[in-house]
Image (cartoon, grey):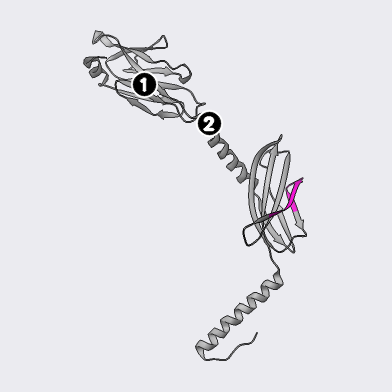
Amino acid sequence: MDRYQLNLLNRGTITFKSENGEEKIEVSEKLVVYQNENYKIGGYQIVFSNPSIEAITYLSKKFISKDNVVAVDYDFAKAESELIISFKNGLADDCSMAISAVLADKGAFDTKVERQNRAELAAGAALTVSAGPALLNVSWKKTNSSVDRCVIKVQFKVESGVEYLVLNKEVEGEFLSITGLAYGRYSVTLEEYAGGKLLASVEASGHLSNSTEEFRKEMEEIKEILKGVRRAAGGHYVTI
């Protein structure tokens, strides 16, 4: 491409789009087009908005200017190294323009979609854990109609942070009451499967407390507070 041909090209703009909208393109003496991270979309076009261009040939197909715009269909699967630009009224000889493509990272996109799908399914599972008299009540929802197996796992959490598995059970329905548990903190995990594939894994926590013991501790704390108030005010001591 000589300087005059380049000057004619600079009279307009070159953009890149897909069915998803505007896409990234770098323009100099060659074009660098970037595939959308969603490699499954199509409808790519390199759009030349330029009053000096009559037509552009790409993949043996000629795209004619309409209202000073030439939209060239581009396929990343059939990427070619150049396109041919024809100018109006013989303003300049035809010239070629090189194209290079930057392809999407398919693995990264698939991982991102899988993560998003699992997050949506996890939210739909609506796992809740509540404490009853010496028991934990666990409720949830099946994320969709394809779920054919639900597994509940319960782990006891000691103060050191170590967890001990106390229940690993396949369950029917959307509710489970777990009895025979010691006082303390628990983590409850719900796993939902469809045809052997893990669709969602959600975790919630619960706390089983000895209400009598906690009440005694609360009363002791109140006594200490009242002692402090008496000492500060010089008033009478209140006995509980």
Q: Quadrant of residue 30?
A: top left
How would you classify the magenta stretch by its main secondary structure? strand
Residue 214 colored magenta? no
The answer to whether 237 appears left or right of 150 in the picture is left
Check contact, mark 2 vs mark 1: CB within 8 A. no
Which numbered dot is residue 47?
Answer: 1
Q: CA distance from mark 2 to mark 1?
A: 29 Å
The secondary structure type at the circle numbered 1 is strand
Q: Label 1 sits on what residue type?
A: Val
Which residue is found at the position 54% from the left and 84% from the top?
Answer: 228
In what quadrant of the picture does the N terminus appear? top left
Residue extending furthest toward the left: 4
Q: Label 2 sits on what residue type?
A: Gly
What span is colored magenta in the figure?
164-176
Which residue is found at the position 62% from the left and 61% from the top?
Answer: 160
The answer to which of 45 and 220 lies nearer the viewer is: 220
Percent coordinates x, y for residue 188 in the rendering: 67, 52
Percent coordinates x, y for residue 76 in the rendering: 46, 20
Label 1 neighbourhood size at 10 Å, few (<14), some (14-19), many (20+)?
some
Residue 174 colored magenta? yes
Label 2 neighbourhood size at 10 Å, few (<14), some (14-19), many (20+)?
few
Which numbered dot is residue 4?
Answer: none
Percent coordinates x, y for residue 185 in the rendering: 66, 60
The answer to whether 177 appears left or right of 95 in the picture is right
Q: Which residue is mark 2?
A: 107
Total numbered badges shown on the rendered structure: 2
